[in-house]
């Protein structure tokens, strides 16, 4: 997790809770049929979401461990959805996002406009994938995340690009 040196007491508390509650979150996410890699991904996604939403954390509204458990629950639901989607993908129903650059000029202009609507970090990821040909594993390693988490992120980016292209 990145550390802000100038963070609020609430964020400092959150970081402490995140570190101390990881084992409990792993136990919470563990279910029959879930691999330990899946459980790790779920908890990693939950902690990443907690970090991204750290400014929304308010210790006066409840225990931090409850908030983290709730985020882990949501991450587990998203994981189950992803597994379902992946099963459909493997059956050939819906290909994963390709992020290829269009060949014709009009489509390229629309694609550039759509890419410009993304936040800078997401735009850089899409461009690295589409223009530089970075592999999913290379991008995941660079971000310090799992391939599965990265693919979920790209699925959301793909949807954002589809909306922007409409």
Image (cartoon, helix red, strand yellow):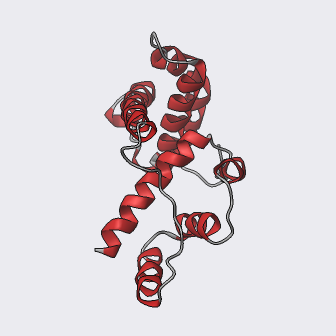
Q: Is residue 149 left or right of residue 131?
A: left
* Quadrant, the N terminus: top right
Which quarter of the rendering shows the C terminus? bottom left
Q: Residue at x 45, y 37 (%)?
A: 90
Q: Residue at x 38, y 27 (%)?
A: 73
Q: How many marks?
A: 0
Q: 86 above or below 135?
A: above
Tell me if 132 is positioned left or right of 78 in this view.
right
Q: Residue at x 47, y 43 (%)?
A: 49
Residue 133 sits in quarter: bottom right
Considering every residue shown, the one lying at the far top of the view is 32
Farthest left residue in view: 166
Towards the viewer: 83 or 94: 94
**Of residues 43 and 155, the one drawn nearer to the viewer in this rendering:** 155
- Residue at the (38%, 48%) spot, across then down: 94
Residue 39: percent from left, percent from top: 53, 23
In the depicted structure, whether residue 30 falls above or below residue 147: above
Single out the residue that lies furthest toward the front: 92
**Place of residue 117 in the rendered image (x, y in percent of width and height, measured from the top left):** 42, 75
**Up/down of 97 relative to 59, above or below:** below
Q: Considering depth in this image, is 3 or 147 the residue closer to the camera? A: 147
Residue 24 location (% of width, % of height): 53, 16
Q: x and y percent of residue 3 in the render?
A: 66, 48
- Looking at the image, residue 108 sits to the left or right of residue 128; the answer is left
């Amino acid at each position: 997790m990145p550390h802000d040196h100038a963070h609020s007491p609430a964020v400092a508390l959150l970081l402490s809770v995140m570190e101390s509650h990881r084992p409990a979150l792993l136990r919470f996410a563990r279910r029959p049929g879930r691999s330990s890699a899946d459980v790790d991904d779920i908890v990693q996604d939950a902690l990443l979401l907690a970090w991204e939403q750290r400014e929304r954390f308010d210790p006066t509204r409840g225990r931090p461990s409850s908030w983290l458990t709730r985020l882990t629950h949501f991450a587990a639901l998203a994981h189950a959805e992803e597994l379902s989607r992946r099963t459909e993908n493997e059956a050939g129903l819906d290909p994963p996002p390709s992020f290829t650059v269009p060949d014709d000029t009009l489509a390229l202009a629309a694609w550039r406009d759509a890419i410009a609507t993304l936040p800078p970090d997401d735009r850089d990821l899409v461009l690295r994938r589409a223009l530089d040909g970075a592999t999913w594993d290379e991008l995941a390693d660079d971000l310090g995340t799992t391939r599965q988490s990265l693919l979920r992120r790209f699925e959301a980016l793909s949807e954002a690009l589809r909306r922007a292209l409409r």
